[in-house]
Amino acid sequence: MNHALIKKLPEHEWLEFISRLGLVSLGDAREIFLSGDYSQLSDLSQKALYTAGRGKTLSLEGNLIGSKITLDEAQLIAEDNNAEQGYPNQDEILAYVQFELAVFWEKFGERLKSLSLFRSAKRIVESTYLDSIIDFNISTMQLYEGSNDSYKDVRRWIEYFAANDMQTMHVLSLRALAKYHRGEKEYSEAGGLQVEALELAVEYDYPFIVDQIKNSYGYTLYSMGKIKEAQELFSGLIQSADSRYLRSTILENLTLTYNAEQKYEQAAEYLSQAIEHSQKYDILSQLPDECLFLGDLYREKLQQPELATYYYEIGSRAALKMAEHGFSLKGDRLDVVNRFENRPKVGYSLPESLTPKAERFAFADGLTWKQINDLFQFHLIKSHLESGMAIADLPEKLELKSSTYYAIKRRLNQHGYNLSDDLTTAQLKSKHAVSLKSYVNGFQELSWSQANQRFEKEIIEYLFKQVGYHKNKLADELGVSYPTILQKTKSLGQ
């Protein structure tokens, strides 16, 4: 990471740089904000900006909880900086952090929190640059709520951003007005504005915004009934989209096009891909409505109530987790919770191929016991590290001696499982890593010994059934001795 790139910039230029970066190039934002450790910075203003940039990048990636926690941290740092400065009436750093928090809450449907933060930021903002962006966002929120005066305001802001060479905001303001027209079912006006914004984004070389606008334009085509055109656009876009969050929304939009054609099986396939993707990358905000839609599709169109219940449960868990972090339980989030709570209590069961247990353990098919054990232990340690735990604290959390922990880590590394890699050998070996990761996340409160004992019992139960309860065959499949299998199956009652 190139720290010098940032340190040479004055504070106000720094702020503008951060506010644009993720929107212009998500790849650059990842490199700058997700690959460095800024906890040791002594300058609180710079530390607040780094942290806000990280929170913004996580939001663009769809990491809802990570983004919220990081932006909250940025606000605390900015408030400490404000106190050190003697509580000045104007504080650009704190105003910027509050602005990003406002954008975050608006993005995820919390209008009142967002508006309050925008107004708080406006009271202390210093630069004309940030003040204009805050005013524009307030006008946009009011426009979406039906204020005719705000329509004129947004139009004036478009002209202002163009005249003052604020290229990013010029593009974003055109996109915002297009969203309004689409909501009013004025599709021709919406499409024209999106094309104009797209041409500018291409001219300015903003690849991330280009993909966002293409996705929005595809949805406008879908809304106009131009299903095939929309389908072709989404199908091409899914191959190139860099943003994980955007990929989820593209898959959702593809689902809508096939649903409109009454091709329900294809619609279900695309939405199940979206749900798997959202689970894999913790795009929590998308899961409630994705699961609600797919559950209803299975219940009402495909007549498979057992699968409807399966997806309602996933969506309900996500909605309740969002509620724990301050998001209102309303709309699709409330609906999917109610669907799951009010599911029919009948005697059906999920097909074996789709039960959570079958999914979570399918990674083990065809592997030896050593390989299975390595994969589980790798993901178990990785899950603790990804939750934010420091490496130095992990042995104590797992109730392991430090020497034992590092011996385990060394063995895994020798077998190709490097805990420091983002793209791990373990993930490359197993296409079922998403389900395994989700399963292992449920072991957070267990010691190393407890986790391994529980896993061994459950995986052996699954594998034993797979081979028809033949101990000799299971021993051969796992590459272990028959006495070992006798010991491992002893508690299963077979």
Image: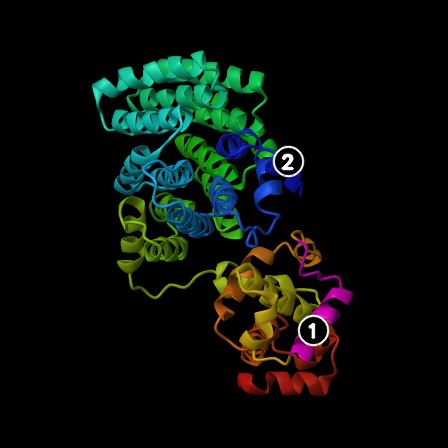
Question: Observer-nearest residue: 268 or 170?
Answer: 170
Residue 420 in the magenta stretch? The answer is yes
64 horizontally vs 374: left or right: left
**Number of marks drawn:** 2
254 horizontally vs 94: left or right: right
Which of the two labelled residues, at mark 1 and mark 2, occupies the earlier sequence position? 2
The rendered magenta stretch, by its main secondary structure, is classed as: helix
Residue 283, given in percent of the width and then of the height, sits at: 47, 47
Residue interval drawn in magenta? 402-421
Label number found at residue 5: 2
191 w.r.t. 10: above or below: above
Question: Observer-nearest residue: 482 or 63?
Answer: 63
Mark 1 or 2: in front is: 2
Which residue, given by chain and number where applicable, does mark 1 sit on? 406
Q: Within the image, what quadrant is residue 183 found in?
A: top left
Residue 412 visible in the shown view: yes
Residue 223 visible in the shown view: no
Q: Are marks 1 and 2 in contact (CB under 8 Å)?
A: no
- As helix, strand or loop, the secondary structure at mark 1 comes to helix
Label number found at residue 125: none
Q: Within the image, what quadrant is residue 462 found in?
A: bottom right
Question: Observer-nearest residue: 389 or 18?
Answer: 18
